[in-house]
Amino acid sequence: MEQTLRGTIISGDDFEPIDGILTMEDGIIKDIEEKKIAADTIIAPCFVNAHTHIGDSVIKDPPYLPLEELVQPPHGLKHRALAEATYNDLVISMRATVQDMIRTGTCAFADFREGGLAGARALRDALGPDNRVEAKIFGRPSDGDMGYLDSCDGTGLSSTNDLDIDTIKDIAKRTKEKGKKFAIHAGERDASDISPALELEPDLLIHLTNAGDGDIRSVSEANIPVVICLRSNFITGAGLPPIRKMLDEDVLVAAGTDNVMLNSVNMFSEMEFLSKTNIYNDRQVFMLCTLNGAKVLGIDTELGSIEKGKKARLMILTKKSNNMQGIKNTLSGLVRRARPDDVIKVI
Ligand SMILES: [Zn+2]
């Protein structure tokens, strides 16, 4: 069925705001027509949240503890909470988080799912049969068992400092032998795990908060995408990732909300925080939260921007709310101040 939307369309891979009419049919964008109209809505592509741990939905308000005590496997608070949670509690709490993602304009996410095969199955159960969010799952071995790999997109590990390096090498090798992606956190607490992570030739790195110039050059040369998690880094005291340097070195950078224990999955909040770092480029910030995430997840031919032939996963925002009224530059307004309560509808 054909449907039309009128408003200021954040169009194409360069996110150029144009007033006009967007036509979609059977969930696919058919046409974008530029036209002089009184546009009081913004039609934007949905967010891609490139790094989450939504299993943490069972522990949303932990005490303020050092990062290691909170998340380090196997005895960090989060892992104890996950071990104590019933399967049902885990599924129900993750389902609420997935619904929150949809409500706040996210159409795809990549999750580091702990707990081996059962952990991956719990996330699939949380997504449910009528799931509307594209989920990429990076599983993690449980007691050495890598049976999750067949039903996951890859493996996601915490840090080379958290496990015996030979064990990690074996996990990386077995992941790649299955044709799956190997992802790992690096440079979060300090830079000591960046070189060992690079030696594993990962498909994806998370954080690089404490990466030096040489590290970033190595990542760029190896063509490895990086997901930065700004709000997570703030709350754990990890610092501000060298975003400007990564972009200058042509590293593909995407954004993620990281542990649900530390942050909500609201990408508007992540985007606003990003706009307040020294990027000073609204287009680039929006790209980090949408198209670049889609590239990292390998779904950019379908999602991440408003282009003919892509899926019509859109959010429609008002320009008339007290928060948004009077904005002169639609993209800047969207990036720097839009909130979930300015969203009229998520498609
Ligand atoms: Zn993480």
Image (cartoon, rainbow, N blue to C red):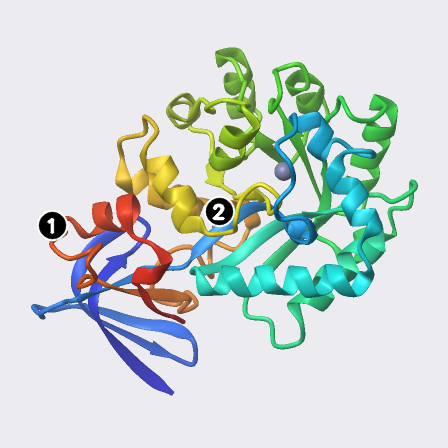
Sequence-earlier tag: 1 or 2 = 2
Q: Amino acid at mark 1?
A: Lys
Q: Percent position (x, y) of residue 313?
A: 42, 66
Q: In the picture provided, is 100 more to the left or to the right than 139?
A: left
Dividing the image into four equal quarters, which quarter contains ligand 1?
top right
* Residue that mark 2 sits on: 293
Viewer-proximal residue among 289 and 154: 289
Mark 2 residue crowding within 10 angstroms, few (<14) / some (14–19) / many (20+): many
Q: Disc 2, ligand 1: is the CB inside 8 Å?
A: no
Q: Are marks 1 and 2 in contact (CB under 8 Å)?
A: no
Viewer-proximal residue among 173 and 335: 335
Q: Is residue 180 visible?
A: no
Q: In the picture provided, is 179 more to the left or to the right than 44?
A: right
Q: In the picture provided, is 48 more to the left or to the right than 25?
A: right
Q: CA distance from mark 1 to mark 2?
A: 27 Å
Q: Amino acid at mark 2?
A: Gly
